[in-house]
Structures are given as structure tokens and as C-alpha cells.
Image (cartoon, rainbow, N blue to C red):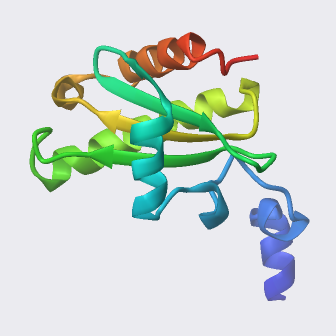
């Protein structure tokens, strides 16, 4: 009975189809040494509200790290900034070259920006880094 309920009202749960693009734990940068490596050795492009660091990795997938300093604001504003950056990456990752480690750093100006503005800046940075196919 319960299985029939899921099939009728939530077919995406039983069909095994992914909806959207989820970032798994193996697609994120979490170690401090990875962030430092990108800061010192990676290519850097600054846009109006984000700074993007990128460097090739030896994997066939991109890994993303997000940082947001306290200059952006308190926790609510920092979390919103990270959500905006993550969403911008999610929209662009389908048309990007694979095999890069990427760190997106929020600048102070991101606090008042809309999602479309952040997407434009992230797209600009990725195009400058020649990562968009």
C-alpha cells in the first residue's frame, strides 16, 4: 500500500531518476590544503561580487569550494551568499570543462545582489578562465 502511494504521488523517489544536479561530498573541496593550493597556484579572476580561483586536477570531474568571509555580514548573509554562489555554479556546470578544482570567494558586494547578478559574475569569471565549453 505504501509503495503504491510513492509510485503515484512521488514517482521520482522510486524511479531512481536524479532531479537537478546534486553536489556529492566527493565533488566539494573541504581540506584547508586544497584551498591554499588554489590560492597560491591557481589562476584567479575577480568579478564584481566574486573572485574565482581554478586549477586543473587529476580527476575527470570538477570539485567546488565556497568561501565567504565575515566582511560579507553575519551568518544569515554569509549563508545566502554561499547559496547564491552554489546555485550559480549549478546552472553553469553542465556546460563547463571537467577536471578542475574551483574556489569561489564572495566579496563584500554580494550581500545586496540578486541571483541573476551573481550568475553573470560567475559566468564572466569562468569565461575568462576559459572553462566554459
Nearest the camera: 48 or 114? 48
> Looking at this rendering, what residue extends furthest in the front direction?
41
* Residue 6 in which image quadrant: bottom right
On screen, residue 76 versus residue 2, left or right, reads left
Residue drawn at the location 43% of the way across and 29% of the way down: 52
For the N terminus, which image quadrant? Answer: bottom right
Give percent across and percent down for residue 15.
89, 64
Q: Is residue 31 above or below residue 42?
A: below
Q: Is residue 119 above or below residue 22?
A: above
On screen, residue 57 versus residue 127, left or right, reads right
Residue drawn at the location 39% of the way across and 44% of the way down: 83
Nearest the camera: 41 or 8? 41
* Residue 82 in which image quadrant: top left
On screen, residue 126 versus residue 39, left or right, reads right
On screen, residue 96 versus residue 92, left or right, reads right
Nearest the camera: 12 or 110? 110
Give percent across and percent down for residue 53.
46, 32
Residue drawn at the location 12% of the way across and 47% of the way down: 70
Give percent across and percent down for residue 98.
76, 36
Amino acid at each position: 500500500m505504501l509503495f503504491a502511494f510513492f509510485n503515484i504521488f512521488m514517482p521520482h523517489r522510486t524511479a531512481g531518476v536524479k532531479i537537478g544536479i546534486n553536489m556529492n561530498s566527493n565533488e566539494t573541496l573541504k581540506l584547508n590544503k586544497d584551498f591554499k593550493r588554489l590560492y597560491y597556484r591557481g589562476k584567479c579572476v575577480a568579478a564584481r561580487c566574486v573572485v574565482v580561483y581554478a586549477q586543473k586536477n587529476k580527476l575527470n570531474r570538477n570539485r567546488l569550494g565556497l568561501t565567504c568571509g565575515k566582511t560579507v555580514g553575519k551568518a544569515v548573509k554569509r549563508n545566502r551568499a554561499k547559496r547564491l554562489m552554489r546555485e550559480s555554479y549549478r546552472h553553469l556546470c553542465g556546460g563547463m570543462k571537467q577536471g578542475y578544482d574551483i574556489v569561489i570567494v564572495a566579496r563584500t558586494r554580494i550581500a545586496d545582489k540578486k541571483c541573476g547578478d551573481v550568475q553573470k559574475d560567475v559566468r564572466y569569471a569562468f569565461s575568462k578562465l576559459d572553462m566554459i565549453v
